[in-house]
Amino acid sequence: MKDSSTTAQGTTEAHEDRIQRVYLDTTRDANFYGGHVWKMEYSQAYSHADRWFTTPQAADEYAAEQEGFRLALAARQEPPAGFVPDSGCGICSPCDCPQTFSGPHLYAQDGSMGITTAWSAADGVEFYIDQRPGARLDLAAAKALHQLLGATILEVEDVTA
């Protein structure tokens, strides 16, 4: 997921994923806060757990560690039939014990957009809109994307039944 913050809002983009984002808050006085200007921010449900760091590396390491704990504490479930292991879960590289699995996916005929699915040990089935650079999302494209989503949901229901 792309971080939509701008420098005008006092942040500069670093990265974002489904759990947190890490960014440099340019409105925070580095001298007053001892250099703690990099923020690791959880999603809204976990906003009370936000942390500040002096380097982006420290924030990234902490975020990965917390995600590792979350996955370790999650109840172990086997993925549905039709979902295949990803090459890595993003926590460790190379990954010896994949926690995420790729599932059914459908793309528009021109390949400009699609719906992909994943299954994770912690979150179950997830759906993603995969829009390629330069793709236009006008009314016709939005309708096509909606149809792809419906077809993908039906396919996921088939493999999880």
Image (spheres, rainbow, N blue to C red):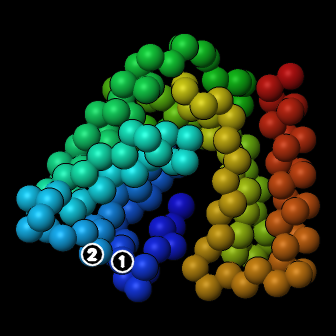
CA–CA distance in space, label 2 to label 1 = 5 Å
Choose the circle earlier in sequence order: 2 or 1: 1
Front position in the image: 118 or 105: 118
Identify which residue is drawn at 76% across, 80% down: 137
Residue wearing tag 2: 26
Name the residue rendered at 51%, 19% in the picture: 74
The reply to whether residue 109 is in sight is yes
* 86 over 8 or under it: above or below: above
Q: Residue furthest front?
A: 32
- CB atoms at circles 2 and 1 under 8 Å apart? yes
Nearer to the camera, 158 or 1: 1
Q: Is residue 71 above or below residue 21?
A: above
Secondary structure beneath dot 2 equals loop
Image position, residue 128 (x, y; %): 67, 53
Under mark 1, the amino acid is Gly
**Residue at (32, 42) in percent of width and height:** 63
Query: Which residue position holds label 1?
Result: 10
- Identify the residue at horizontal 55%, vertical 48% (top origin): 44
Q: Compare residues 74 and 144 and report the one nearer the observer.
A: 74
Q: Is residue 44 left or right of residue 52?
A: right
Left or right of residue 96, residue 46 in this image:
right
**Picture quadrant where residue 7 is located:** bottom left
